[in-house]
Image: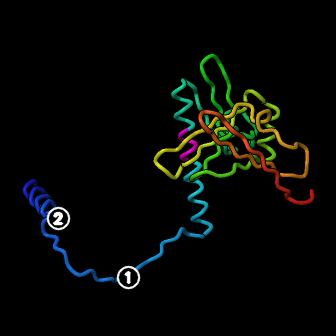
């Protein structure tokens, strides 16, 4: 087995020496585009969200926190919370500091949509509520931006018939929040 492996590696190492210049023959070309199938898009978004959740877990655990995912009703109930707590992660840090973390993952960059339930919990929990936006999840180097009390820092026209869409980014170590309000129709 060892001799076969050594022989195969020797052949692979010689391959560049065996290449000789010659006429290029065009065989075919192809255009590869991402799938537009709903199932593929849903699976891709789930993968992005999982990368973001895993990064948040690692970050919090590195700070000595006990981390519980509560983004699904059964997980929230197991943590003693209502079915839809308005955040994804419950982190209990040393000193009993509690962080209710809403995780938003994006493949590259882009706007972050905050649901009515998440916004209401941010309003109620204030300093205990954190928004962790993880950008570039589809690359080897995701980047996380953390905002404590997003209700205060990202406040835009509350109690309207509008949907709040936030973009959070970091420039030179400074977090910048841009609010865009989009009408979603009659209530």
Q: Nearer the viewer, residue 24 or 120?
A: 24
Is residue 25 toward the left or the right of residue 11 in the image? right
User: Are dots 1 and 2 in contact, CB under 8 Å?
Assistant: no
Residue lying farthest to the top in this orientation: 95
Q: Nearer the viewer, residue 70 or 114?
A: 114
> Quick one: quadrant of the N terminus?
bottom left
Q: Magenta part of the protein: which range?
A: 50-55
Residue 38: x %, y % from top left: 62, 67
Secondary structure that dominates the magenta span: helix
Indicate the quadrant where residue 155 lies. Answer: top right
Q: Tell me which residue sits at (75%, 35%) in the image.
A: 150
Examine the rendered structure and indicate whether residue 181 appears above or below residue 34.
above
- Residue 130 is tagged as none
Q: Is residue 52 one of those drawn in magenta?
A: yes
The alpha-carbon separation of the residues under discs 1 and 2 comes to 24 Å
Under circle 1, the secondary element is: loop
Residue 157: x %, y % from top left: 87, 44
Q: Is residue 25 one of those drawn in magenta?
A: no
Q: Earlier in the sequence, mark 1 or mark 2?
A: 2
Residue 96: x %, y % from top left: 65, 19
Q: Which residue is mark 1?
A: 28
Examine the rendered structure and indicate whether residue 78 appears above or below residue 94.
below
Is residue 140 toward the left or the right of residue 57 in the image? left
Examine the rendered structure and indicate whether residue 152 appears above or below residue 10.
above
Which class describes the residues within 10 Å of circle 2: few (<14), some (14-19), or many (20+)?
Answer: few
Residue 125: x %, y % from top left: 78, 30
Residue lying farthest to the left in this orientation: 3
Q: Tell me which residue sits at (74%, 31%) in the image.
A: 149
Q: Which residue is mark 2?
A: 16
Examine the rendered structure and indicate whether residue 64 appears above or below residue 170.
above
């Amino acid at each position: 087995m060892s001799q076969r492996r050594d022989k195969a590696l020797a052949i692979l190492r010689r391959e560049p020496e065996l290449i000789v210049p010659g006429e290029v023959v065009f065989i075919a070309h192809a255009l590869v585009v991402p799938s537009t199938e709903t199932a593929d898009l849903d699976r891709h978004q789930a993968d992005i969200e999982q990368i973001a959740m895993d990064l948040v877990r690692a970050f919090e655990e590195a700070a000595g926190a006990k981390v519980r995912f509560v983004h699904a009703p059964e997980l929230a109930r197991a943590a003693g919370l209502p079915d839809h707590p308005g955040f994804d992660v419950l982190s209990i840090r040393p000193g009993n500091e509690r962080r209710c973390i809403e995780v938003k993952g994006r493949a590259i960059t882009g706007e972050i949509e905050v649901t009515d339930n998440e916004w209401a919990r941010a309003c109620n929990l204030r300093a205990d509520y954190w928004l962790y936006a993880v950008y570039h999840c589809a690359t080897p180097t995701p980047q996380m931006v953390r905002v404590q009390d997003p209700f205060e820092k990202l406040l835009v026209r509350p109690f309207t018939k509008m949907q709040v869409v936030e973009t959070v980014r970091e420039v030179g170590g400074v977090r910048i929040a841009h609010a865009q309000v989009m009408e979603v129709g009659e209530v």
